[in-house]
Image (spheres, helix red, strand yellow):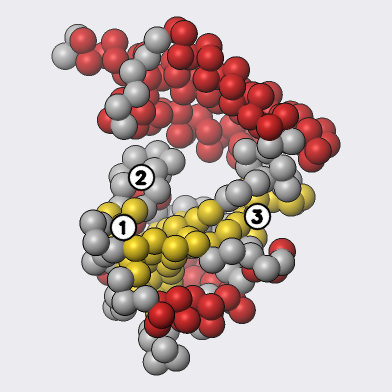
Amino acid sequence: MNDLDFSAVVVTYNDEKHLEECLGSLSFCRERLVIDLGSTDDSAAIAREHGARVIPRDWVPMVELVKEEASSEACNEWIIFMDPDMIFPAHLEERIRLEIASDGALGLIQLPYRNCFLGKALHHGVWGRDKWYPAVVHRSRVEFQPSVHSDTRTKPGWKSVRISPENETDMIRHYWIDSWSQFFEKHRRYLAFEGESRFRQGTRFSWTKCLFYTSFESFNHLLRKAGYRDGWAGIVLGILWTWYNWKAWLSLREFEKALKHV
């Protein structure tokens, strides 16, 4: 399968900090494509300097809204999607090729990733354990979900597999949050779409569910997934995770109220 060509797709908006390292880790891909959402920093220039084809596009608040469009711009059927703050473990290339060669019904390969918060890797909690990213897709065998925190999934008849890490170097390194301002900006942006996303997935608001699931997610992060073991960062993130889930349920409530007045 060494003759299989990949296209790498990165969607960026003012992401110059990690973009050079991201594109460098994808150097094995025959094509590297950067969809730029109107960056005002040097993201587009960095991409061109590293041999990527840059396609300007109007800004959207979530990368999920442009994945399908981006896949149509790629020259190859197999695409590796990376966020601009993700560093691909290039030595996994051979394992990916073997997976594709061994199963003709494969449509999606999920890769493990490690979130880094303020430069420090997280190993516990909801952001540190059991994290998988739908990184490698065959564009005609998957469905892209244009809603917040929704995973790409295979169409009926096609398979999805996970490549389990043998050690830490097998995991995508994700510079998830570099500053507190970035944390709040990102999550406030997501909250604007949480209500609609949950409603379309069949969730309906009630105060009982709101209180129960918000409390459960706090327990899930801090105790069940041992978020406290990441020290002060894990504890603070547990508090913020509780805040986010509370606000997400209220976002669903507001969305339902708005529908009643349409």
Residue 93 point in image, percent of width and height:
53, 79
Contact, CB < 8 Å: mark 3 with mark 2? no
Write the residue at 45% across / 76% down: 99
Secondary structure at numbered mark 2:
loop
Write the residue at 25% across / 57% down: 155
- Identify the amino acid type marked 3: Arg
Q: Earlier in the sequence, mark 1 or mark 2?
A: 2
In the figure, is residue 218 to the left or right of 48?
right
Q: Earlier in the sequence, mark 3 or mark 2?
A: 2
- Identify the amino acid type marked 1: Thr
Q: In which quadrant of the rendered image does the C terminus lie?
A: top left
| Residue placed under numbered mark 2 in the picture | 60
| Residue placed under numbered mark 3 in the picture | 114
Secondary structure at numbered mark 1:
strand
Report the front residue among 22 and 173: 173
Residue 243 point in image, percent of width and height:
59, 21
Secondary structure at numbered mark 3:
strand
Q: Earlier in the sequence, mark 1 or mark 3?
A: 3
In the figure, is residue 36 to the left or right of 75?
right
